[in-house]
Image: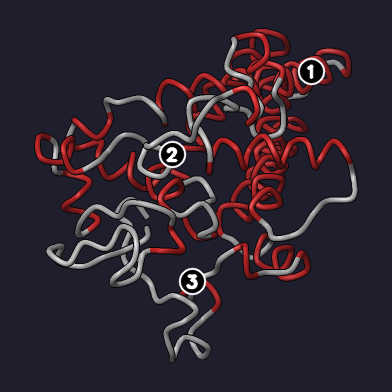
């Protein structure tokens, strides 16, 4: 999935008979039940849960004490939100990956496509070739220092399960429904602001502790106007003229609100070889 391709939207005919993940899915048009059905079918979630089972087996083969195992697992839960925040702010929102041709497709897949259309479910889930090594490097070494191989397995399992939680809550934040719980409402509102008002802040997905500590937390009322780069992360036609790698992969630059990108409306580029909302 390194290179994103144009997929049929729900408005295009003939998609109903395709296999589930050959169709396009948009969270603003799905129910919670449909989301749960899709979530547990997605290959990344299946992979995370499968790796967690392998971690349990590794822990059984190379056990450590219960205290060290628990400490390794809990430390992973604490470290993960900080690692995610820093990666989100400085890598995914950094202005450097699209300038390096071998990394342009990765940046497009793991974050540019998501901001171009935040409700497009296929590009919301992280790509395994980037997420699994990151989770392992962020958790396993700490677990190994605490409890050897068993500790590393426990910590890696903690990172994998936290990722499953993050991915589901991330989906919830883009689903067209109002959560009953206040804490989920708060979480969702901050993330919606990140996607539709100003992308330079609210980098946490389920935890905004580090945003508050590092000065990137905000509410819409705190900022005077909408960011002009909230949907393209600063990768516009001017930037693409110098670094065209992502534009070439996308078949043009889509701008403006993703639901208004139709001919004659905001963000339609008649000169592009193809117009996508990926």
How many marks on residues? 3
Disc 1 from disc 3: Cα separation: 45 Å
Query: Which residue was labeled with disc 3?
Result: 24
Query: Which residue was labeled with disc 1?
Result: 64
Label 2 SS: loop
In the picture, the quarter occupied by the C terminus is bottom left
- Identity of the residue drawn at 19% across and 31% down: 100
Determine the image quadrant of residue 9. Answer: bottom left
The percent position of residue 198, horizontal first and vertical second, equals: 50, 32
Figure check: 205 above or below 47 = above
Determine the image quadrant of residue 208. Answer: top right
- Identity of the residue drawn at 63% across and 20% down: 217
* Sequence-first disc among 2 and 1: 1
Q: Nearer the viewer, residue 269 or 278?
A: 269
The percent position of residue 137, horizontal first and vertical second, equals: 52, 22
* Sequence-first disc among 2 and 3: 3
Q: Does residue 143 appear in this view?
A: no
Disc 2 from disc 1: Cα separation: 47 Å
């Amino acid at each position: 999935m390194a290179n994103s391709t144009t997929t049929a939207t729900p408005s295009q005919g003939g998609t109903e008979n395709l296999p589930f993940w050959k169709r396009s899915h948009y969270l603003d048009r799905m129910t919670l039940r449909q989301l749960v059905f899709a979530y547990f079918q997605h290959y990344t979630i299946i992979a995370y849960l499968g790796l967690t089972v392998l971690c349990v087996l590794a822990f059984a083969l190379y056990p450590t004490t219960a205290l060290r195992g628990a400490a390794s697992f809990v430390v992973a839960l604490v470290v993960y939100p900080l690692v995610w925040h820093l990666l989100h702010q400085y890598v995914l929102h950094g202005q450097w990956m699209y300038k390096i041709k071998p990394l342009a497709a990765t940046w497009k897949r793991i974050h540019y496509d998501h901001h171009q259309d935040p409700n497009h479910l296929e590009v919301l889930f992280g790509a395994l070739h980037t997420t699994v090594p990151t989770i392992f490097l962020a958790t396993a070494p700490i677990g190994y220092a605490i409890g050897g191989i068993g500790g590393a397995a426990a910590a890696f399992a903690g990172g994998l399960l936290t990722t499953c939680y993050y991915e589901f809550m991330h989906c919830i934040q883009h689903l067209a429904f109002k959560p009953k719980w206040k804490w989920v409402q708060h979480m969702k509102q901050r993330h919606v602001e990140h996607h539709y008002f100003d992308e330079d802040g609210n980098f946490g997905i389920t935890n905004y502790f580090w945003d508050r500590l590092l000065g990137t937390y905000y509410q819409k009322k705190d900022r005077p106007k909408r960011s002009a780069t909230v949907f393209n992360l600063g990768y516009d036609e001017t930037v693409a003229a110098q670094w065209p790698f992502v534009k070439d992969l996308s078949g043009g630059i889509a701008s403006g609100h993703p639901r208004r990108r139709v001919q004659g409306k905001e963000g339609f580029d008649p000169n592009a070889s193809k117009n996508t909302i990926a």
